[in-house]
Image (cartoon, rainbow, N blue to C red):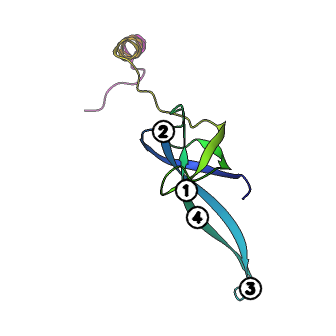
Amino acid sequence: MKPMVGVVVSNKMQKSVVVAVDRLFHHKIYNRYVKRTSKFMAHDEKNECNIGDRVKLDPSRPLSRHKHWIVGEILKRARVYVPPSAETLAKTNAETEASVSKRTPSSPSKK
């Protein structure tokens, strides 16, 4: 078996991840390329993988009933959303209030 590249779709297990691998093949009847996705369980020794990471899978001996792959390397890390802290929110709110108070209405209000 040759190494494969896929995207981590689940990391809820200890030292294991589920990786989705896409492949294209030519359909002879439809004369189109068709995309198929296969999911493989892989061993992640250091629990480094997160959902969305692009990883390279290397074949190995059977590690369990479903695990026959090892995460060789993480090719690209996923962008993880980090919510802003309370200090940052307070600072931005103070800045916006200051900029709003500096503005003066240039046109008279409609009645």
Q: For the magenta stretch, what is the residue range?
A: 99-111
Between 107 and 6, the one lying in front of the other is: 6
Q: Is residue 104 magenta?
A: yes
Residue 3 covered by magenta stretch? no
Which residue has dot 3 on it? 28
The residue beneath circle 1 is 40
Dots 4, 2 in contact, CB < 8 A:
no
Mark 3 is on which residue type? Lys
**Dot 1: few (<14), some (14–19), or many (≥20) neighbours within 10 Å?**
some
Name the residue at the left extreme: 111
Under mark 4, the amino acid is Thr
Front tag of 2 and 3 = 2
- Where 93 sits versus 26, above or below? above
Q: Residue at x 70, y 86 (%)?
A: 30
Which percent across, then down, holds residue 22? 63, 61
Instruction: Give the foreground label among 4 and 2.
Output: 2
Q: Give the CA distance from mark 2 to mark 3.
A: 41 Å
Residue at the disc numbered 4: 37
Name the quarter where the N terminus is drawn. Answer: bottom right
Say which element carries label 1: strand
* N-term mark: 4 or 3: 3
CA separation in Å, label 4 and label 3: 19 Å
Where does residue 68 sit, x and y in percent of width and height?
58, 53
Q: Secondary structure at mark 2?
A: loop
Q: Mark 2, residues whose alpha carbon is within 10 Å: few (<14), some, or many (≥20)?
A: some
Which of pointers 3 and 1 lies earlier in the amino acid sequence? Answer: 3
In the drawing, what numbered circle is on residue 97?
none
Q: Which residue is mark 2?
A: 15
Q: CA distance from mark 3 to mark 1?
A: 27 Å
Q: Secondary structure at mark 4?
A: strand
